[in-house]
Image: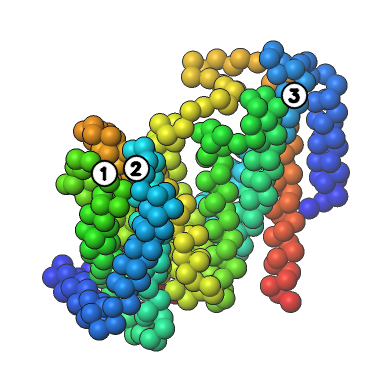
């Protein structure tokens, strides 16, 4: 077992590399932002400016977020496979460093997306007296779980045929429990009620379980 | 597998089917529709059994890296998918005849649908990864990860969807609410379909291992 500081340094190195890469190409970020804009405007336009009921709004918000994430996040490992750096990464980096580096990178990308998505969503769907902070909190909790699952599934699908559609197919069943409870919770907040502790704990619990399981299983996936 | 076992299994399944259509009394409120139950419940059980076995062999594979365990895990998943489809189909027909709609996202329908999604994703994963060792690794990891979501689903689904599904065989009070003939036939059907599952599993394993050797 290596000392903690070494793992920490490897994680930050991977994060830094990914951010630099992203800043040079804007590939994942531009896809994510444009996908969100397209999905949001197509829904808002087709509904003609009506504000749907809270639980319907919540479902729309999460469907947009899920498919946007699916459009952008497969890039996290696919880019390494395309550039031919996957093998180098396997040789030089610790599996856990790769997992947590990519996980944090995905999470930060999703967090950035949420900060753009939420105000636009409130604007497009004319939501009166939105509770911005609780909503953002739920979105971030959901993003943590989504990042944990998608890091694993992106690694699985990076070297497969038809990887971007495979990535979505693989991720959806694994994210479902969190997806359903996040929609419920978002619906509660949108109908101007305080979020229930049980559901919030469930969401946080799922994120923790997904991160732990991902970390345990990633070693097997990475060492082939 | 010896021919006598195959023959005995076939005989068993035929007898159970005959019993379902002869001695099983009509159920209160369901009438003779209750006959579907003797095929539906065992199929749903085997769909879940396939998932459990697949996860178990996935662990064995990751520990030992023996291709045999991957083949077992993958065959259990594929058979599980078939039985899952049959259970979903028979359930939908039963639902239409008793509560008026093929599909209404009842908790049990949701659960079995998620199982279908997981099985489907597993098979797409296997089909898309070319390298055998990498395919086996990814498949095992996927099965185990999907296994972790199960307790969460058990918690969230009853809160999300309303249920019309008939009471489980053994209800919360721990009492069995069923005619004794029905119970007997149902247990025989459960044993028969489980036997069929295991028979198909060994048959597929034999075919797939000879294919690997060639």
Q: Nearer the viewer, mark 3 or mark 2?
A: 2
The residue at which mark 2 appears reads as A51
Q: Residue at x 23, y 32 (%)?
A: A193
Q: Residue at x 70, y 65 (%)?
A: B208
In the displayed structure image, the side of residue B151 where residue B71 appears, left or right:
right
The residue at which mark 1 appears reads as A127
Q: Residue at x 71, y 74 (%)?
A: B213
Q: Nearer the viewer, mark 3 or mark 1?
A: 1
Q: Chain of mark 3?
A: B
- Can you give x and y, in whole percent of width and height, for residue B84 in the image? 64, 45
The number of callouts visible is 3
Q: Residue at x 49, y 15 (%)?
A: B173
User: Does B39 sit above or below residue A76?
Assistant: above
Protein image colouring:
rainbow
Nearer to the camera, A219 or B147: B147
The residue at which mark 3 appears reads as B33
Q: Residues within 10 Å of mark 1 (few under 14, many from 20)?
A: some
- Can you give x and y, in whole percent of width and height, for residue A145 in the image? 31, 53
Determine if marks 3 and 1 fall on one subunit: no
């Amino acid at each position: 077992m290596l000392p903690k500081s070494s793992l920490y340094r490897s994680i930050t190195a991977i994060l830094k590399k990914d951010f630099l890469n992203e800043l040079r190409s804007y590939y994942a970020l531009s896809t994510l932002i444009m996908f969100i804009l397209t999905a949001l405007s197509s829904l808002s336009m087709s509904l003609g400016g009506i504000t749907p009921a809270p639980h319907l709004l919540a479902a729309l918000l999460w469907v947009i977020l899920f498919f946007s994430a699916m459009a952008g996040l497969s890039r996290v490992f696919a880019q390494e496979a395309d550039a031919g750096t996957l093998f180098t990464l396997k040789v030089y980096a610790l599996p856990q460093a790769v997992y947590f580096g990519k996980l944090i990178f995905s999470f930060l990308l999703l967090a950035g997306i949420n900060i753009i998505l939420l105000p636009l969503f409130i604007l497009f769907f004319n939501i009166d007296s939105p509770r911005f902070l609780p909503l953002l909190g739920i979105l971030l909790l959901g993003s943590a779980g989504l990042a944990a699952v998608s890091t694993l599934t992106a690694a699985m699908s990076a070297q497969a045929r038809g990887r971007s559609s495979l990535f979505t197919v693989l991720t959806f069943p694994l994210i479902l429990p969190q997806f359903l409870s996040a929609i419920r919770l978002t619906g509660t907040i949108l109908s101007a009620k305080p979020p229930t502790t049980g559901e919030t704990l469930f969401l946080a619990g799922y994120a923790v379980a997904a991160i732990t399981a991902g970390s345990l299983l990633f070693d097997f996936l990475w060492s082939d | 597998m010896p021919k006598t076992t195959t023959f005995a299994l076939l005989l068993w399944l035929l007898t159970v089917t005959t019993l379902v259509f002869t001695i099983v009394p009509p159920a209160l409120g369901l009438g003779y529709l209750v006959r579907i139950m003797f095929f539906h419940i065992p199929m749903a059980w085997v769909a879940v059994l396939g998932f459990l076995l697949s996860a178990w062999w996935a662990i064995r594979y990751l520990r030992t890296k023996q291709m045999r365990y991957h083949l077992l895990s993958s065959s259990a998943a594929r058979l599980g998918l078939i039985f899952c489809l049959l259970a979903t189909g028979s359930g939908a027909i039963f639902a239409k005849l008793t509560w008026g709609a093929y599909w209404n996202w009842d908790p049990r329908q949701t659960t079995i649908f998620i199982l279908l999604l997981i099985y489907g994703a597993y098979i797409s994963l296997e089909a898309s990864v070319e390298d055998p060792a990498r395919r086996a690794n990814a498949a095992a990891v996927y099965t185990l990860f999907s296994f972790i979501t199960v307790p969460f689903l058990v918690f969230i689904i009853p809160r999300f969807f309303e249920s019309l599904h008939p009471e489980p065989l053994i209800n919360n009070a721990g009492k069995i609410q069923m005619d004794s003939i029905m119970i007997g036939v149902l247990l025989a059907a459960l044993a028969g379909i489980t036997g069929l599952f295991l028979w198909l599993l060994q048959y597929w394993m034999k075919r797939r291992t000879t294919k690997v050797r060639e």
